[in-house]
Amino acid sequence: MKKLCGALCALFLLLSGCGGPVSDSTDFFAMDTFMTLTAWGDNQDDAHAVVSEAEQEINRLSNALSRQVEASSLAELNAANGEIVTLDPDTYAALSRAVEYAEQTGGAFDPTTAPLSDLWGIGTDAAAVPDEAAIAQALTHVGYQNIELLDNNQARLLNGAQVDLGGIGKGYATDVVASLREDEPLLAQLGGNIGAYGENPSSKDGLWTVGLADPDDSANYIATLHIQDASIVTSGDYERYFEQNGVRYHHIFDPSTGYPAQTGLRAVTVVDKESTRADAYTTALFVMGLDKGLAFCEEHDVQAVFVTQDHKIYVTGGLQITLADGVDYELAS
Ligand code: ADP
Ligand code: MG
């Protein structure tokens, strides 16, 4: 197994040589994760201009899409007690996309799981299994049908609903970053979301190689995929979780039960031109599980990789995947 970083990692070497495009990179922490942006250009100033504008945009979106940032448009919506709120245009756009994918996935993706995240406290020191009554109570506020989208960037929440765009935010930000680029190569790594655009200057075929993390050790990868002008997104049970009595409770909730989705999957990866869609789909497919997930991919022409607890890797048609040397995973058909 090879070394890597995080749920997904773009594997590339910067070629040093004369005459090729020049690159500039920035590393920073936003949206609760580490990000790296690398842009290429004819000169350092051009490459630098792209990464610094992209970083600023991500920081702006991080505020617009976060329910934790008190002054954010989303926090305002959540605090409005059912009143109509005029949202920041990006908050409105991301919320609209979230509702679209909630409808399309039959609620497997649901941006109103905030009360469940708060109740379970995943990622906090207070993380614990709540009692059944508390879960049932939280569930009474969960349901994307409680989001009412109105004209002119306005929306309101019914029935005490609370919105959390954590399942789609990094995808939305990746698409915004991609839209800043003209035609020079750009590699955006937003935690488990990668966008790889243009010709990879470091590979002969121009493709970008991305490693799929080993769910048991995300510093290693179990397989690689090649992409171009596309985004690749992973959701897994190994990023944010706690364990109680030998059971792992992670941050992706099944909105129909109020519990972290337990479907025998460790991770789902989606490759799509649009990172927003890929992000919503990875979360939804993780909740659906393997059989329903594969059927959904077939019906909606989604390119996905499912990694199961019993070390099998299922790949939908159209994706080429290469197992890393020496891994105890097998490709299933
Ligand atoms: P990551 O945050 O690791 O990229 P995901 O994209 O799968 O992972 O998003 C998980 C986040 O989305 C959770 O932290 C929570 O904020 C929210 N979430 C949890 N369950 C769901 C769900 N069923 N539908 C939509 N969002 C969810
Ligand atoms: Mg997601």
Image (cartoon, rainbow, N blue to C red):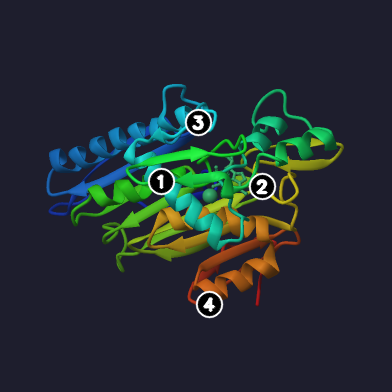
Mark 1 vs 3, N-terminal side: 3
Q: What amino acid is at disc 4?
A: Gly
Q: Quadrant of the N terminus?
A: bottom right
* Residue at the spot 59% in from the left edge and 42% down from the top edge: 112
Q: Is residue 206 visible?
A: yes
Residue under the image location 63 percent in, 66 percent down: 293
Say whether disc 1 or disc 2 marks the residue closer to the N-terminus.
Answer: 1
Residue 331, placed above or below residue 123: below
At which x and y percent is residue 105?
58, 61
Q: Is residue 260 left or right of residue 235?
A: right
Question: Neighbour class for label 2 at 10 Å: few (<14), some, many (≥20)?
Answer: many
Where is mark 2, residue-wise?
237
Q: Nearer the viewer, residue 332 or 118?
A: 118
Type of the residue with mark 1: Leu
- Figure quadrant of the C terminus: bottom right
Tag nearer the camera, 4 or 3:
3
Q: For the residue labelled by badge 3, is the local secondary structure a helix, a strand or a loop?
A: loop
Nearer the viewer's eye, disc 1 or disc 2? 1
Circles 4, 1 touching at the beta carbon (< 8 Å): no
Q: Tell me the crowding category of disc 4: few under 14, some 14 to 19, or many 20 or more residues within 10 angstroms, Cα based.
A: some
In the image, 203 versus 197, the foreground residue is 197
Q: Secondary structure at mark 4?
A: loop
**How much space separates mark 1 and mark 3, taking CA atoms?**
20 Å
Where on the image, by quarter, is ligand 1?
top right
Considering only order in the chain, which callout, 3 or 4, is on the residue closer to the N terminus? 3
- Mark 4 or mark 1, earlier in chain: 1
For badge 2, the amino acid type reads: Asp
For label 4, the residue is 317
Residue with the most extreme front position: 83
Which residue was labeled with disc 1?
150
Q: Is residue 14 visible?
A: no
Residue 280 at what x, y percent from top left? 51, 54
